[in-house]
Image: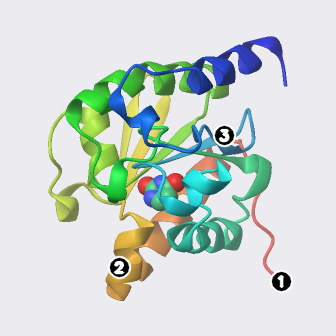
């Protein structure tokens, strides 16, 4: 890990810019590759993530992990993080002011990772990015191109755990992400066995 990354992580860990830090056990920055072609962004750490200091390691993380792994997008191929880096008490939605405050860290993280594709998980991530509440059935599964990178929003894995009918579209969306990364020359064709 180079100095820029270390400085970034230290900045996140020492941040008290919003009220969330006082309740959190850990500041949850990322897991996965530092220069991954895919950045996966969720809402905020839950209980397990807060305990372990890593994003998406609870039940919804297991689903996400399986989805990514089924397309060879696990490990160094993806950089997994959240809109806010500290757990909101009782897993409530992060407040707009908390999202605004934490966005400086996400922007710095984006500049370090330099992903080609961003997968936003759920409506909170979409709203944090685009500033408007999404109608999921209208925006889900579609790439938006911005300054040479591509953003797709899909269902949050926690939503798919509560609504199993969302699992297939979620799986298909991750498949589209793999396809695009191959088309962009970021990953080799997936070998089927
Ligand atoms: N839900 C999220 O949005 N992020 C996590 O890290 C875990 C659950």
Q: Residue farthest to the front?
A: 22
Residue at horizontal 81 percent and vertical 71 percent from the top: 191
| Residue 170 percent coordinates (x, y) | 43, 71
157 versus 140 height, above or below: below
The mark closer to the camera, 1 or 2, is 2
Question: Dot 3, how many residues are within 10 Å of its Cα: few (below 14), some (14-19), or many (20+)?
Answer: many
Residue positioned 24% across, 54% down in the render: 139
Judging by the rendered image, the residue that carries numbered circle 1 is: 193
Q: Sequence order check: which comes first, mark 1 or mark 3?
A: 3
Secondary structure, mark 1, is: loop
Residue 15: in sight, yes or no? yes
Judging depth in this view, the residue of 22 and 146 nearest the camera is 22
Q: Is mark 2 within 8 Å of ligand 1?
A: no
In-front residue for pair 191/89: 89
193 versus 45 height, above or below: below
Residue 94 image point, x, y percent: 29, 43
Looking at the picture, tell me which residue is in the foreground, 173 or 79: 79
Q: Which mark is residue 166?
A: 2
| Gap in angstroms between the C-alphas marked 1 and 3 | 24 Å
Cα separation between marks 2 and 3 = 25 Å
Residue drawn at (80%, 12%), measured in percent from left and top?
3
């Amino acid at each position: 890990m180079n100095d820029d990354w270390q400085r970034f992580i230290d900045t996140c860990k020492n941040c008290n810019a919003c009220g969330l830090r006082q309740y959190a056990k850990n500041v949850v920055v990322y897991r996965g590759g530092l220069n991954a072609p895919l950045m996966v962004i969720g809402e905020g750490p839950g209980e397990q993530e807060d305990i372990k200091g890593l994003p998406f390691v609870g039940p919804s993380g297991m689903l996400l992990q399986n989805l990514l792994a089924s397309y060879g997008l696990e490990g160094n191929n993806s950089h997994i993080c959240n809109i806010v880096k500290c757990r909101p008490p009782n897993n409530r939605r992060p407040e707009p002011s908390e999202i605004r405050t934490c966005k400086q860290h996400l922007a710095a993280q984006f500049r370090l990772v330099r992903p080609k594709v961003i997968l936003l998980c759920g409506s909170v991530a979409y709203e944090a990015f685009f500033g408007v509440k999404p109608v999921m059935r209208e925006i889900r599964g579609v790439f938006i191109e911005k300054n040479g990178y591509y953003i797709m929003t899909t269902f949050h894995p926690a939503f798919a755990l509560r609504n199993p009918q969302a699992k297939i579209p979620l799986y298909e969306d991750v498949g589209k992400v793999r396809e695009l990364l191959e088309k962009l020359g970021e990953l080799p064709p997936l070998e089927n066995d």
